[in-house]
Image: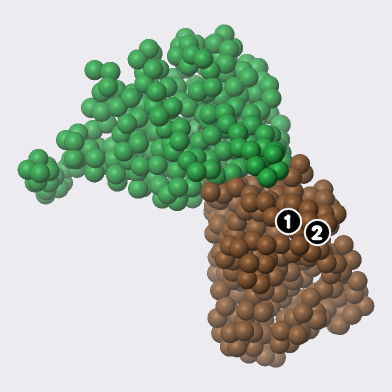
Chain colours: A brown, B green
Amino acid sequence: MNVPKITKIIENKREARNIITITFRYPEEIVPGQFFMIWIPDVDEIPMSVSYINGDIKAITFRKVGDATSALYKLKPGDKIGIRGPYGNGFKMHGKHILFVGSGTGVAMLAPAVEEAVKNRISSTVVIGAKNKSELFFEKRLKKCGARVVISTDDGSAGCKGFASDVAKRILKKEKINTVLTCGPEVMMKILLDCCKNIPFQASLERYMKCSIGICGQCCIGKGLRVCIDGPVFDGKTLKKVEDFGVFRRDSAGRKIQF
Amino acid sequence: MSFVIENDFIQGLYLTFGVTLIDITTKIAGMILKNPTMLASGIMDEDAGSMKRIIECDAGAIVTKSIGLNAREGYPNPTVIELDYGILNAMGLPNPGIEQYRQEIGQLKNSKTPVIGSIYGANAKEFIELGEKMEDYGASALELNLSCPHAKSYGLEVGCDPKLVQEISSSVKERVSIPVFVKLSPNVTNIVKIAKAAEDGNADAIVAINTVKGMKIDLELGKPILSNKIGGYSGKAIKPIGMRCVYEIAKNIDIPIIGVGGVTTGEDAMEYFMAGASAVQIGSGVYYRGLDVFKKVCVEIEQLMKAYGYKNLTEIIGVTHK
Ligand SMILES: Cc1cc2nc3c(=O)[nH]c(=O)nc-3n(C[C@H](O)[C@H](O)[C@H](O)COP(=O)(O)OP(=O)(O)OC[C@H]3O[C@@H](n4cnc5c(N)ncnc54)[C@H](O)[C@@H]3O)c2cc1C
Ligand SMILES: Cc1cc2nc3c(=O)[nH]c(=O)nc-3n(C[C@H](O)[C@H](O)[C@H](O)COP(=O)(O)O)c2cc1C
Ligand code: FES
């Protein structure tokens, strides 16, 4: 059955400006990179990646951007939401040294992947990108788990000035990296893919989602790849053949919108 | 047992002489399909890329998402949930509008697999404009959606009135030269009456059925889950309903029928053929058995035909009426 199960919010925690984490009980197994459909009754149902995995307790971390996320932002501990999933494929983690590149809310879904990599004794370098200092989050969490963390902000208010992809480029030039995993604005991820040449690459994509069970076709990219089932994580080889990658997405009516 | 062995023996002989024993091609309104499995409207067919992937999965034909004159976002989520025995949806006819859809269909112009343009409108005038554009973009046939159960002033709201159905069918027929199919809803008192109206309006084939109106309520919240509250039920649970509709229609009209509703296996397809369908469409089956459901169903149809001693589909279509 793929129907939302009702669960209560256990905690909501502010992470940065307009960004919070909501914690709840949801006993299904999930791997980093997978996502839930979160039902906010009377408002909407939206896809959200898992940002914490702690046994039966899971969490999502998101930015307030529109109706659904604003409604979710306002909910208090004890309020009810519906959850279905997990959906999607998740990351595959190989190699001795992984470079994680997260920008904006993309950092949220990379965090559990970083924690798992460190647990499996994979050296992990994380580039966290944000517009400015007030939008940075998860820096402490990722340092504490044992990853090397490099910060970049567009305006230089924290860490290096510039985009996460610029910092990543420098690291790729100097160090031996076995895999690059990324989530962030698609244009940034596309630039990163171009710098990776032969280094294995995986990126997590966002597309408008409705069914999340692979039938409605709303989330398709390229030649019928369903972001909800075949993704949201795709490898570089696949993405090189997807003409939409970094170029356009489709809105809920199916109209193409340029990035 | 000996029957099967004998059949294998004959098949062997045929193979040796380069002749296939079992023929699963089918013909609808002059269109020849390499096999009788078609993609149902609204599943993986909003953009050219998805439809190309389904074509590669060996569907005999593709039906596009239902397209209207203007872009429509559809209802807010939740729009689709999966229940124990079927799938409940209230998408609300999301589509980019006919002008934007040109670039999608245009990319399939050279496809050997027929692409059938599904359209919805509020009246004959809208259907004519949409139909002419679809033909112009290269669609092989039209499917008039007179059956969506959950969109205000479209679909079923038009398709439950025999007079309107006849008027829309005949006025579209007059203006296009490609075959015109009419897709019907089971949510009416007498589906035969509506099918007859389509036939009287010179439709080339009937497609039956669209989804069955349904609802799901969450106990803890005491609220319907779909944002539109009411949706359309599809998948395994509705097969007997589709079967009854196809059977009743076949008994009363002469134009070909395409059976839809709960087809996931070759056995389901065979039942529909026997009830009178010349082909089947598969929607929810894509969820139950994956994108290669078309290939799987075709292989199963061939196996069943072999087991029951049929050589081609015409021997099976409508046997229950003989
Ligand atoms: C697999 C996946 C995982 C995601 N994980 C996270 C996450 O961990 N943290 C986070 O902050 N955001 C995440 N998002 C993005 C998040 O789903 C949107 O920000 C959210 O849906 C916005 O809804 P809204 O009503 O607040 O905004 P709106 O004003 O409705 O829209 C704002 C933007 O969100 C997009 N959006 C709206 N509804 C959907 C939908 N049903 N599916 C996809 N996009 C939609 C719109 O296209 C628009 O670009 C994820 C998206 C996907 C596809
Ligand atoms: C998600 C979804 C979207 C659909 N959209 C349409 C549509 O746009 N037009 C239409 O005529 N039928 C639509 N249908 C109905 C199907 O084409 C089909 O008639 C119905 O699902 C029964 O077949 P099935 O049991 O094989 O799914 C949709 C069905 C589903 C599940
Ligand atoms: S959201 Fe429906 S196919 Fe992916």
Disc 2 C-beta below 8 A from ligand 1: no
Q: Position of residue A168 (x, y in %)?
A: 73, 80
Q: Identify the residue shown where x is 71% and y is 84%.
A: A145
Between B159 and B120, the residue placed more toward the observer is B159
Tell whether label 1 touches label 2 (CB within 8 Å).
Answer: yes
Disc 2: which residue: A77
Number of disc labels: 2
The amino acid type found where label 2 is placed reads: Pro
- Quadrant containing the C terminus of chain A in the rendered view: bottom right
Q: Identify the residue shown where x is 67% and y is 78%.
A: A114
Q: How busy is the neighbourhood of tag 1: few (under 14 within 10 Å), some, or many (20 plus)? A: some
Q: Quadrant of residue B172?
A: top right
Q: Is residue A178 left or right of residue A65?
A: left
Numbered label attached to residue A8 = 1
Give SS at disc 2: loop
Viewer can see residue B27 = no
Q: Position of residue A4 (x, y in %)?
A: 63, 49
Nearer-N-terminus badge (2/1): 1
Q: Is residue B27 left or right of residue A206?
A: left
Q: Quadrant of residue A55?
A: bottom right
Residue at mark 2: chain: A
Viewer can see residue A16 = yes
* Placement of A180 over or under B105, stated as above or below: below
Between B281 and B288, the residue placed more toward the observer is B288
Between B85 and B93, the residue placed more toward the observer is B85
